[in-house]
């Protein structure tokens, strides 16, 4: 028998192929063509479906780059291979490509004989710790099964023969495992074995399932396992490179009832994660993001919680065997839709039946495609409290041939948390006994339906559910949730991007009347219509009504004020009030509409030029920090904001405000002041505005003198173009050393005023030298005399000054 590279045999395959750059060359050294691993020609005629391609992988290049010759003969690969093929996939036949070549056995071709008389034959290379051998079939062909556990004997002359354990004679070829010394305190015997040796009964002590071994591919690892302590002895861990057993890290006597490790390395490797403790004392495992591809077949009799999220499990494990009394199962972000077993690529009864009936919490986001049979979850897990199927960018649930409506799965009435965010469920199920749709759950606390775009109709909460706390029904076709009035447990509603939201007042009643714990009502970019209710929610803190279709007015048909006086009378905790709609009434806001909200922090109101009247009274809002009244039709004077000592941002642009811009003073937090596109006629002097950096007041009717801005030492941008300014107070800009942009273009400044501005700017520069300042004086009188020389000096220092 001739082997092209006899060194690459047995266990050496694992180490010799680790981290090679060219995987195809590595296979060629075994006389194994990579194309032998991708025999797909004629697959369409052979009945291959798209699902059968899921585990197909190239070793070096994305497979779609070399599939042209198969494109005509198989139409199933398009769109699948872009997301399914890759070096981390598991191939059928125990060949696994994940940075290294490993597995239980690799079939290869070899030449038997030499020269023209050589015959191509097939054999296998064992890469497991206990050898696996070729089939005893004669001759061995490419489809012959690999034999595990059959006897391999040595005939006279040294030839190998295959047979059953009792079917051959002569010396038997065996593997031998060396006994390993006890290394950690936690290596307690788990079993007692009695046997008869030489007529005497001998008792042997053994450790079953110690260590518990997982194989992953990672650089960093954070893991924890909960145990019930044996003799107060902590557990120990070992992280070992699979390709180099001498490269390991021990974590000895780690923690107490919770044993946690934080492993860090500069290089990702395939490594064993070894945990040393009696499996019967393991109560819970959290082992995430380690690229684990399979779970060890060890029974964890008393484990109630397993978290293997964000790994590479493809074949759904038999949890009934691993943890028969499990209560919490978290397998989020594992590619079960790529299972080697075709009928386990959906969340169906084949999967559900692998999980113990004792389960309380099920987390299976980003794992399966397709629909879910309506009652399989409720039928099996009669005590389920959490169903978490939220999509986070991976596989998701959607209509298919088995369920074109893709109904939301029913759950038992014990369910408290129901989360199916960002899938494509389209209908509610039908309640039958304890198999309930979400509308009929009386113990439901948290409901998340966000992002199921085609889910439509009415969402009502069971009348006898007094525990509901939060609902997220955004980005759906659902109307605003009903059945919530008077529920004091209800705290949060997110119904944003909902195209069919509807009114807040139905039949004359506010939908969330007397929900005294409701703190967040978030209806951003939803088609909320109609009048404003009287918000009777004493805990309401965040009211988001931007980009809605609200008209405003009172619940009783009063349209004299777009926001009536008593709208927020009960909302003493209101902090954010944001309202924006192009349908709002063309009537004023009642002057006292915000007098009942002392904690108001953020006020945003935009009516697209519709709301008239004065800016409402804000004197009671001592915490007001952001004031956005952009694009309305407010008239009258701008308030001085003297009571709003926390004010930071003011935007009253695109209104019809008139009179002088007030003499703002002693507002130590004011940073941004936008007042452009109004009808202001004068500019007062600002005093003690030490934080003001941006003041925009262009496109007004401001006449007279530019005052001193010495009271604004941190002024950065000053924009006053397109006004009627004629004069300038001498020294006005002399001490604004942080000024970077000044635009006075389009005014009526005299030559004297322009010259004095230039003189003050030169003084400014001489006191604090810096470049990068832009000055725009176009549209005013031209500078003259010494001012022109000053301009040349400033330009030479990196200033940009334009005046014609």
Image (cartoon, rainbow, N blue to C red):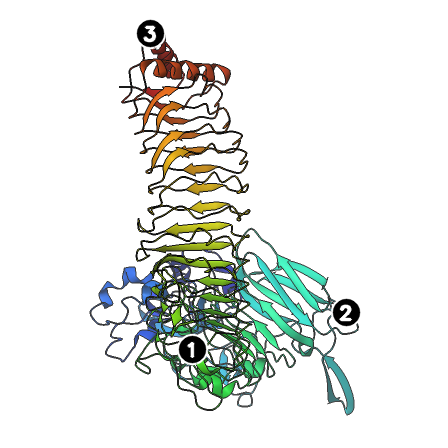
Name the residue carrying label 2. 233
* Secondary structure beneath label 1: loop
Quadrant where the C terminus is found in the figure: top left
Q: Position of residue 9 (x, y in %)?
A: 49, 66
Which x, y percent locates residue 530? 34, 65
* Quarter assignment of residue 345: bottom left
Of the numbered discs 1 and 3, the one sitting upstream in the chain is: 1
Between 751 and 441, which is closer to the camera in this rendering?
Answer: 751
Corner quadrant of residue 123? bottom left
Residue placed most toward the observer, 396 or 193: 396
Secondary element under disc 3, as helix, strand or loop, is: loop
Q: Is residue 172 visible?
A: no
The reply to whether discs 1 and 2 touch (Cβ–Cβ < 8 Å) is: no
Tag 3 residue: 785
Q: In the figure, is residue 688 to the left or right of 756?
A: right
Q: Nearer the viewer, residue 477 or 341?
A: 477
Report the side of 779 relative to 133 (left or right): left
Q: What residue is pinned by disc 1? A: 460
| Separation of marks 1 and 3 at Cα, in angstroms | 79 Å
Quarter of the image containing the N terminus? Answer: bottom left
Q: Earlier in the sequence, mark 3 or mark 2?
A: 2
């Amino acid at each position: 028998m001739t082997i092209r590279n006899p060194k690459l045999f047995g266990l050496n395959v694992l180490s010799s192929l680790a981290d090679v750059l060219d995987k195809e060359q590595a296979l060629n050294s075994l006389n194994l063509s990579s194309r032998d691993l991708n025999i797909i020609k004629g697959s369409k005629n052979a009945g291959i479906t798209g699902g059968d391609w899921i585990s197909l992988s190239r070793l070096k290049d994305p497979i779609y780059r070399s599939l042209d010759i198969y494109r005509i003969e198989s139409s199933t690969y398009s769109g699948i291979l872009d997301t399914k093929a890759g070096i981390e996939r598991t191939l059928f036949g125990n060949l696994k490509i994940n940075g290294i070549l490993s597995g239980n056995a690799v079939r290869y071709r070899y030449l038997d004989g030499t020269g023209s008389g050589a015959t191509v034959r097939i054999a296998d290379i064992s890469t497991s710790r206990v050898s696996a051998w070729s089939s005893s079939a004669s001759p061995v062909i490419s489809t012959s099964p690999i034999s595990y556990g059959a006897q391999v004997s040595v005939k006279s002359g040294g030839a190998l023969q295959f047979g059953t354990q009792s079917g051959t004679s002569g010396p038997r070829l065996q593997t031998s495992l060396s006994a390993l010394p006890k290394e950690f305190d936690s290596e307690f015997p788990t079993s007692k074995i009695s046997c008869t040796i030489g007529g005497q009964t001998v008792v042997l002590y053994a450790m079953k399932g110690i260590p518990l071994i997982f194989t992953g591919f990672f650089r960093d690892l954070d893991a924890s396992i909960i145990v019930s302590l044996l003799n107060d002895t902590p557990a120990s861990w070992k992280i070992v490179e699979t390709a180099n057993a001498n490269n390991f890290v021990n974590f000895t006597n780690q923690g107490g009832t919770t044993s946690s490790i934080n492993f860090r390395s500069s290089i990702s490797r395939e490594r064993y994660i070894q945990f040393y403790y009696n499996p019967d004392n393991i109560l819970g495992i959290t082992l995430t993001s380690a690229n684990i591809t399979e779970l060890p077949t060890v029974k964890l009799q008393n484990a109630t919680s397993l978290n293997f999220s964000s790994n590479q499990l493809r074949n759904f494990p038999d949890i009934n065997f691993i943890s028969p009394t499990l209560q919490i199962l978290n397998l989020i972000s594992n590619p079960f839709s790529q299972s080697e077993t075709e009928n386990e690529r959906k969340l169906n009864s084949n999967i559900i039946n692998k999980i113990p009936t004792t389960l309380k919490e099920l987390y299976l986001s980003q794992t399966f495609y397709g629909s879910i049979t309506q009652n399989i979850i409720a039928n099996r897990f009669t005590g389920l409290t959490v169903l978490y199927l939220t999509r986070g960018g991976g596989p998701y649930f959607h209509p298919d041939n088995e369920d074109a409506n893709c109904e939301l799965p029913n759950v038992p009435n014990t369910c408290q948390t129901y989360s199916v965010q960002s899938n494509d469920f389209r209908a509610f199920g039908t309640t039958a006994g304890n198999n309930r749709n979400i509308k009929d759950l009386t113990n439901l606390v948290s409901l998340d339906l966000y992002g199921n775009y085609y889910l439509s109709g009415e969402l009502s909460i069971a009348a006898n559910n007094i525990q509901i706390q939060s609902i997220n029904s955004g980005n759906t076709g659902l109307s605003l949730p009903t059945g919530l009035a008077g529920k004091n447990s209800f705290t949060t509603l997110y119904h944003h991007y909902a195209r069919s939201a509807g009114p807040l007042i139905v039949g004359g009643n506010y939908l969330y009347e007397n929900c005294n714990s409701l703190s967040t009502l978030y209806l951003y970019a939803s088609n909320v219509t109609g009048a404003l209710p009287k918000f009777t929610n004493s805990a309401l803190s965040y009211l988001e009504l931007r980009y809605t279709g609200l008209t405003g007015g009172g619940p009783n048909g009063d349209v004299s004020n777009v926001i009536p006086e008593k709208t927020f009378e009960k909302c003493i905790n209101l902090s954010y009030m944001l309202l924006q709609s192009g349908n709002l009434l063309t009537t004023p806001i009642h002057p006292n509409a915000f007098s009942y909200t002392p904690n108001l922090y953020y006020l945003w109101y935009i009516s697209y030029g519709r709301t008239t009247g004065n800016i409402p009274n804000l004197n009671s809002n001592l915490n007001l920090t952001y004031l956005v009244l952009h694009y309305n039709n407010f008239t009258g004077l701008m308030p001085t904001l003297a009571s709003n000592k926390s004010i930071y941002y003011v935007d009253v642009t695109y209104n019809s405000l008139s009179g002088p811009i007030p003499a703002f003073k002693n507002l130590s937090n004011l940073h941004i002041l936008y007042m452009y596109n109004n009808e202001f006629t004068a500019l007062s002097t600002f005093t003690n505005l030490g934080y003001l950096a941006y003041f925009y007041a262009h496109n007004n009717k401001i006449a007279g003198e530019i005052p001193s801005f010495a009271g604004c030492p941190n002024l950065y941008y000053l924009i006053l173009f397109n006004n009627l300014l004629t004069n300038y107070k001498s020294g006005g800009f002399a001490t604004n050393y942080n000024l970077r942009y000044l635009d006075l273009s389009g005014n009526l400044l005299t030559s004297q005023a322009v010259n004095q501005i230039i003189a003050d700017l030169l003084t400014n520069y001489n006191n604090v030298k810096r470049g990068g300042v832009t000055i725009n004086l176009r549209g005013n009188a031209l500078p003259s005399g010494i001012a022109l020389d000053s301009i040349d000096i400033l330009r030479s220092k990196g200033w940009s000054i334009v005046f014609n």
